[in-house]
Image (cartoon, helix red, strand yellow):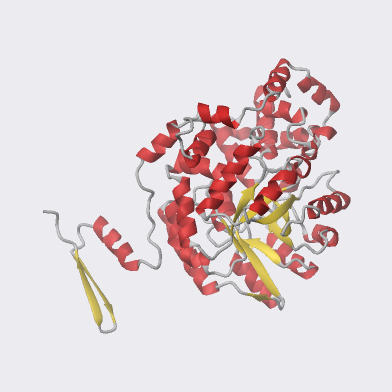
Amino acid sequence: MDVRFIDTTFRDGSQSLWALGMRTGMIEAVAQTMDRAGFAAVEVPVVAINLKKFVRDLKEDPWEMMRMVARTMPHAVKGCMAGGHILSFEAPAPRELVALFFKCIVATGALNRAQLTSNTFDQSKRTFPWIIPLFKELGLHNAIAISYSVSPRHSDEYYAQTTREMAAFKPDSIYLKDQGGLLTVDRLRTLVPVMLHNAGGIPVELHSHCTTGLADLVYLEALKLGVRTLHTAVPPLANGSSQPSIFNVARNARRLGYTTSVDVPGLRSVEARLTAIARQDKLPIGAPLEYDYGQYVHQVPGGVISNLRHQLSELRILDRLDEVLEETVRVRKDLGYPIMITPHSQFVVSQSAINVAVGERYKVVIDELILFAQGVYGEDSGYTWMDPNLKDRLLGSPRARELAARQQREITMRELRAQLGGPGVSDEEFLLRFIMKGDREIAAMRSAGRPRQYRGAAMPLLTLLDELGKHRKVSYIRVQRGGDSLLVQNRPAA
């Protein structure tokens, strides 16, 4: 039996280890090899959080990145997280705007697979009834993720019911999304059979992270239980807080008697090129982590902890990190055990840091917690299980009334267009301005010039010329292959 793999290198691997720092040139350097590597799908960074990163920090045009992906990876199924929101931290955008956003992405040729998370925004009731038909109309493969969590309310019965609800939308696949790397082999033995039984024949995939060091073992157990599609990454963007390495999982799968169709020699060249890029740009190289039981206590994803460290360092209270993590356990319980995934993990951590820094719990409250109590994020966020005293306190605040009044009227597309440049602005530019809240950062991105290039393994001569140009003391290089030779001279400038 063949095992299929979803590659996460460019999207989740980069998000987990490089803080979304995967540049256009980095993708381009290995894209052609990845295109023909035999993956069932390849994740690409094409949704709003990625667009924001490309514009604000990388100073690169994300629409041009998408066209490059479509051009260099014409055969691969290309996927990314998607849903009824554009920016998950904010109230839902008008449906017409969400539809335009995904139509523009699909039009570039950079998206064939929509990965929708079901149980963090109550999407099965609010957005799935209209967003899934839209994605089907756009010709996208629909893969619905069911996020895993450890809490009193996330039982086998909960996952059985959620799987049945998701199967009713007739997606192309369902996958168990273990964003915190919390799954154990024992837990999987009860959970996967429940999901397979209630999926009604829809293929079930598994997506986990190496945060606790157990993901590789969990993947092998999943194969034994009947899962045939696993999410992996190519080193150096595997391991650490990312997904398991394709090399390790594929090798172990073959030793269990399964077949794989990935191009291992080709992917070794991708590993070598990305490792060279990581060293050149001083980016982290993923490595296996030691087992940390604390992950099961606070359940804060690795990427969120790294951002928390940075924030506490700026506040000069980094020495209180353990206190903040202990407080996250209490805040999560107070909120009704939301799944620790974007955006809820950020809400919990931010409020916990404020509680510790101020010295009094909930004396200062972030707006997102009030919106949470108002039910903006849906029943599945956990707000109906909130501590009643905390909920009453939040809902009775003056700020709660202000936020409620703001939500009563949804801005129209006509108004948004008028605010962001009018009818003369292209759809792509309009969407960028909506995401970036204006055009200031977009102008800065464009003034930065062309994206940085990273010569791929298929262009060794160009790489050689680039490097030679950096070393003026090297006068010449002679390259010989069999009876052919090439002399490259470094001539002084006139």
Q: Quadrant of residue 50?
A: top right
Q: For residue 386, say whether it is visible.
A: yes
Image: 128 above or below 463: above
Name of the residue lying farthest toward the left: 494
Residue at image coords 50%, 52%: 108
Image: 471 above or below 391: below
Residue at image coords 53%, 34%: 434
Residue at image coords 69%, 43%: 341
Name of the residue lying farthest toward the bottom: 483
Name of the residue lying farthest toward the top: 398
Q: For residue 14, say whether it is visible.
A: no
Q: Quadrant of residue 469?
A: bottom left
Q: How many marks?
A: 0
In the foreground, 17 or 231: 231
Q: Position of residue 266 (x, y in %)?
A: 50, 71
Q: Position of residue 453 (x, y in %)?
A: 37, 54
Q: Position of residue 319 (x, y in %)?
A: 61, 34
Image: 491 above or below 445: below
| Residue 19 located left or right of residue 293 | left
Identify the image quadrant of the N terminus. Answer: bottom right
Q: Position of residue 250 (x, y in %)?
A: 63, 71
Q: Quadrant of residue 227?
A: bottom right
Residue at image coords 68%, 39%: 345
